[in-house]
Image (tube, rainbow, N blue to C red):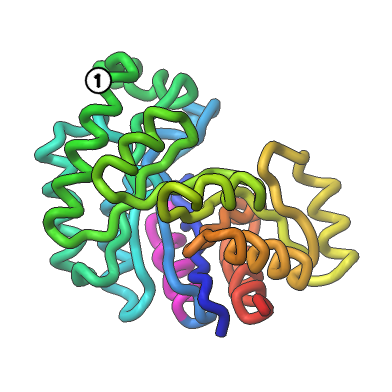
Amino acid sequence: MSGVQIGVMLPTFTADPRLPVRAGAAAEAGGLDGVFAFDHLWPLGNPGRPALWSFAVLGAVSAATDRVCVGPLVARVGLLMDADLLGAVGALTCIAGRGRVVVALGAGDRLSAPENGAYGVPFGPSSERTGRLTRVAGALLAHGVTTWIGGTSTAVSDAAGSIGATRNLWGATVEEVAAARATTPVTWAGPVLVGRNRVDIGRLRDRFADRPGLISGTVEEVAAHLAALHAAGAGWCVCTPLDYITRPLEAVKTVCLVRAAVP
């Protein structure tokens, strides 16, 4: 088995809380290394669609599984008071065990800011959010929790470097991963579109539009790309299959096939 660890984002943009739990169980049975959940109040740009809270889902998945790592990607500072966010992580470690928890943190950006406004949660300036991010990440690291900091800005890079946290790069290229790895440990996360054969990937490409950072191809082609990301320095690759809303369990099981195919 390859040294890269491969995870999948759970289908949390749903009103059915059983769905991500089943997906988490399928991920574990299929050999994936981790399952992760977005920390959004709604899917970006779609405030009318449902979304399950990340930590509630992760707690349920932790109780229904034995091995896979679990964590938010990314938990945004400022949506909760810092003490409440740390408390949520603490509760998750009690359920899953500290060794299974991976917490990816972020400071939020202009795309997620409307969520704060809708619920009356202040969205402070970048310097304030980055400062909170650094403090919360430092507190988690001090308690032995595996912690990633998401983002590509210089401020985020400096924050991760100042406390020895791993950086998570969303949709980064192989070259970008290699460049970032020169200064800090890195992980990769991003959208994938995986077909089980040429016909399947053709249908998926017809249905889902291309987007920045997308890795698209057959099981073998996506596996080769993840192997290249690992060779460039990514310790983890966390896949967000674009078809996980329309066919969630099949999408997760296809990522499991990718896991098995990584050279």
What residue is shown at x 31% (from left), y 14% (from top)?
125
What residue is shown at x 47% (from left), y 57% (from top)?
10
What residue is shown at x 27% (from left), y 53% (from top)?
56
Work out whether 15 lies above or below 1: above
What residue is shown at x 57% (from left), y 50% (from top)?
177
Residue 250 visible, this angle:
no
Q: Name the residue under label 1.
A: 128
Q: Name the quadrant of the C terminus.
A: bottom right
The amino acid on which the numbered mark 1 sits, given as a three-letter code, is Glu
- Left/right placement of residue 104 relative to residue 230 reads left
Of residues 57 and 17, the one drawn nearer to the viewer in this rendering: 57
Magenta span covers which residues? 16-28
Of residues 258 and 26, the one drawn nearer to the viewer in this rendering: 258
Q: Name the quadrant of the N terminus.
A: bottom right
Work out whether 47 lies above or below 32: above
Which residue lies most toward the front here?
Answer: 182
Q: Is 72 inside the magenta-drawn segment?
A: no
Q: Position of residue 26 (x, y in %)?
A: 50, 75
Q: Is 25 inside the magenta-drawn segment?
A: yes
